[in-house]
Amino acid sequence: MLSLPLPGGIRRNPYSLVGDPHDRRKWRIAVRRQEQSRGGSAWLHESAREGQPLKVSMPANLFPMARLARHHILIAGGIGVTPIVSHARELARLGHSFEVHYAHRAPEFGVLVDELRQLAGGDVYCYVASRNEMLDFRQLLAERPLGTHAYLCGPQGMVENFHQVARDMGWPDTHVHSERFLAPPPGEAFAVKLARSGREVAVPGDQSMLEALEAAGAEPPFLCRGGACGQCETEVIACDSAFQHNDLFLSQPERDSGRKIMPCVSRIAGGCITINL
């Protein structure tokens, strides 16, 4: 995964690398044109041009493989196929045992299927919703040999169901892996006070707190920009409004404490928040 700065008021978007990790001459990403794009996917599809220079971050791996596993079950939902392709590519290179299960809405949404079949041969299984084909986690995870690991990247509801089924079937948490990233949702405008400097930064309704802080010249920590890694976890000093936690990292007790927030995807419902920055 790397972060890519984009025009149009968006500082950076995270994207999974889908190319050969051993080819250092180029990095390859796959970007779906979102119907309700904040500008990132629309710009890449409509305005980016070959030869145009872009400054990107160094890649970070937030979804590693268990390399000592006896068998790997790779599962993708929609555009979540991108990190799954990377896993399949590496497993094929190493000669490890693996299979791929790919759920998508319609045949035209089955991007990268041909690449997956080149890597996994006949061990690629597609589930197309328009054909009433459904992926059954209980059936998929049943009667697997010891040492099998399962991986999923997909929508939040799909990931939650995957983990719940695996727990119900007695799979150890160490053998069940997932990756999910959230785009920062819009909301009410609010203000954020920086306790260390005394500055106050306005956060528009269509911008995340992290993006607003960066635009104001602050340098908050970040990595995934999708509420998953915990790198941007920020201490809250005071807040006069309701929290809107959208991350995947904080526990419920941490959210209830009112002392932590993930500014990459979370915000407040108007008013003002003071943070330790």
Image (cartoon, helix red, strand yellow):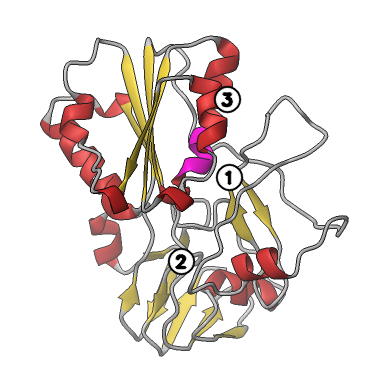
Secondary structure at numbered mark 2: loop
Q: Which corner quadrant holds the C terminus?
A: bottom right
Instruction: Kindly report the distance in space between the C-alpha atoms of the residues bearing marks 3 and 2.
Output: 31 Å
Q: Residue at x 45, y 54 (%)?
A: 181
90 displayed left or right of 168: right
Residue 83 forms part of the magenta stretch: yes
Chief secondary structure of the magenta portion: helix
**Front residue of this view, candidates 116 and 94:** 116
Q: Front-most of 159 and 122?
A: 122
Q: Quadrant of residue 215?
A: bottom right
| Measured Cα–Cα span from mark 3 to mark 1 | 13 Å
Among numbered discs 2 and 1, the one appearing first in the sequence: 1
For badge 2, the amino acid type reads: Val
Dot in front, 3 or 1:
3
- What stretch of residues is rendered in magenta? 81-85
Give above or below for 71 relative to 205. above
Q: Nearer the viewer, residue 12 or 216?
A: 12
Using the image, tell me which numbered label, if any, was put on residue 265: 2
Amino acid carrying mark 1 in the image? Ser
Instruction: Name the residue rendered at 47%, 42% in the picture.
Output: 81
Mark 2 and mark 1 in contact? Answer it, CB < 8 Å: no
Which is closer to the viewer, label 3 or label 2? 3
Q: On the picture, is 172 further left or further right than 262?
A: left
User: Which residue is pictured at 56% across the width and 64% down the height?
Assistant: 33
Which one is nearer the viewer's eye here, 236 or 52?
52
Q: Which residue is mark 3?
A: 89
Mark identifier at residue 16: 1
Q: Is residue 208 above or below residue 57?
A: below
Looking at the rendered structure, the kind of residue marked 3 is: Arg
